[in-house]
């Protein structure tokens, strides 16, 4: 299960994973991962797919390639991605700045607000980035 092992530092939930004809037990060389999105494609961020691919490379030694796509259901748009095993180290390294910022925030107890496209709907009115019209 998702919480069975307490000694992990990253977890993921995948919307849809297709093993392209192989079974999980036969160690596929390629898988396809889909992440369904209900928002707009102009804010497409494939970092979740990249993290999933890096985790899959760690889990499946035979895996050589991960194809995937963000599927924007309201717009009927797909944003495809493709990752190769040899990119794995760079994929993990790309997450290090955010990871280190989280470590520092936990150590200091200071979590600084970060503006995003969701600020206009945020209920935290004390935040300087809040742009809600309430």
Image (cartoon, rainbow, N blue to C red):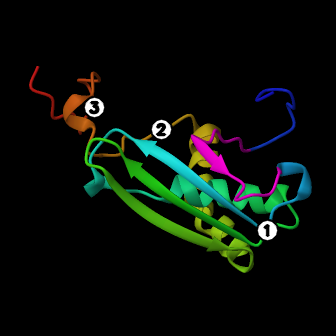
Q: Secondary structure at mark 3?
A: loop
Which stretch appears magenta?
10-23
Along the viewing direction, whichever of 67 and 41 lies nearer the viewer: 67
Place of residue 124 in the rendered image (x, y in percent of width and height, measured from the top left) = 29, 24
Disc number lying in front (1 or 2) = 1
Residue 125 among magenta residues: no
Separation of residues labelled 3 and 1 (CA atoms): 46 Å
Separation of residues labelled 3 and 2 (CA atoms): 12 Å
Along the viewing direction, whichever of 98 and 105 lies nearer the viewer: 98
Per the rendering, the mark at residue 128 is none
Is 132 positioned to the left or the right of 1 in the image? left
- Say above or below: 121 vs 103: above
**Which quadrant would residue 118 be assigned to in this image?**
top left
**Main SS class of the magenta portion in the image:** loop
Residue beneath disc 2: 111
* Chain-order first, disc 3 or disc 1: 1
Place of residue 24 in the rendered image (x, y in percent of width and height, measured from the top left) = 83, 50
Is 18 positioned to the left or the right of 4 in the image? left
Residue beneath disc 1: 29
Residue beneath disc 3: 127
Along the viewing direction, whichever of 33 and 48 lies nearer the viewer: 33
Separation of residues labelled 1 and 2 (CA atoms): 40 Å
- Say above or below: 111 vs 34: above
Q: Secondary structure at mark 1?
A: loop
For the image, the number of numbered tags is 3
Residue depicted at 86% across the width and 67% down the height: 62
Place of residue 57 in the rendered image (x, y in percent of width and height, measured from the top left) = 77, 63
Residue depicted at 76% across the width and 72% down the height: 64
Question: Cβ–Cβ below 8 Å for labels 1 and 2?
Answer: no
Place of residue 108 in the rendered image (x, y in percent of width and height, measured from the top left) = 59, 39
Q: Secondary structure at mark 2?
A: loop
């Amino acid at each position: 299960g998702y919480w069975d092992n307490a000694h992990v530092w990253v977890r993921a939930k995948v919307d849809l994973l297709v093993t392209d004809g192989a079974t999980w037990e036969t160690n596929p060389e390629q898988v396809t991962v889909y992440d369904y999105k209900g928002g707009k494609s102009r804010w497409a961020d494939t970092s979740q797919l990249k993290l999933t691919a890096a985790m899959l490379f760690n889990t499946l030694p035979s895996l050589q390639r991960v194809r995937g796509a963000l599927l924007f259901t309201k717009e009927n748009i797909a944003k495809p991605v493709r990752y190769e095993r040899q990119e794995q180290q760079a994929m993990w390294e790309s997450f290090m700045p955010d990871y280190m910022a989280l470590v520092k925030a936990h150590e200091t107890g200071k979590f600084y607000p970060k503006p995003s496209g969701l600020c206009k709907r945020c209920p935290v009115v004390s935040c300087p980035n809040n742009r809600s019209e309430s």
